[in-house]
Image: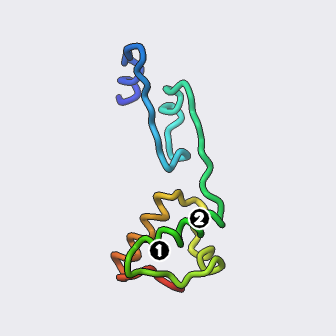
Amino acid sequence: MFLSGLDGFDSPKGLTVLATTNRPHDLDKAFISRFSRFSLFELPNPSTRYDYFISEVKKKKGHKTLLNKKEFSRLNTDFFSYRELTNLISCAIDKVGSVFSL
């Protein structure tokens, strides 16, 4: 029904609809086909993910991590966006009271 609504929507000139997601592989192909353009931005590479993780932990006052790059790679963050890494840090602090070490 949602897609039918998109098909019947007559947009005024100058209106741009922008949709974003951290999980493009989960989107329905019929939904994607309703957009005239599709841009995919790559996820951060392992080194960038680690650097971002460390920089975000440093922003949390009173928290630190003892994870080195090798230990961080064992967390299996291969398909994590920056938002998911930030969420990982927040969840660790909420559950454990600090950012974990292995």
Q: Quadrant of the C terminus?
A: bottom right
When asked about the image quadrant of residue 15, the answer is: top left
Along the horizontal axis of the image, is 72 left or right of 21? right
Secondary structure found at label 2 = helix
Mark 1 or 2, which is nearer the eye? 1
Q: Residue at x 38, y 77 (%)?
A: 61
Residue 31 versus residue 12 in the image, above or below: below
Secondary structure found at label 1 = helix
In the rendered image, residue 4, in percent from the top left (x then y), is placed at: 38, 23
Instruction: Decide which of 32, 39 is in the foreground and name it.
Output: 39
When asked about the image quadrant of residue 44, the answer is: bottom right
- The amino acid sitting under disc 1 is Lys
Q: Which residue is mark 1?
A: 58
In the rendered image, residue 51, in percent from the top left (x then y), is placed at: 59, 68
Residue 39 versus residue 48 in the image, above or below: above
- The amino acid sitting under disc 2 is Arg
How crowded pointer 1 is (Cα within 10 Å; few <14, some 14-19, many 20+) is rated as: few
Q: Residue at x 65, y 60 (%)?
A: 45
Residue 21 versus residue 12 in the image, above or below: below
Q: How many marks?
A: 2
In the rendered image, residue 12, in percent from the top left (x then y), is placed at: 37, 14
Tell me how far mark 1 sits from mark 2, CA to CA: 14 Å
Q: Earlier in the sequence, mark 1 or mark 2?
A: 2
Q: Residue at x 47, y 61 (%)?
A: 84
How crowded pointer 2 is (Cα within 10 Å; few <14, some 14-19, many 20+) is rated as: many
In the rendered image, residue 68, in percent from the top left (x then y), is placed at: 61, 81
Say which mark, if any, is on residue 49. Answer: 2
Along the horizontal axis of the image, is 94 left or right of 24? left
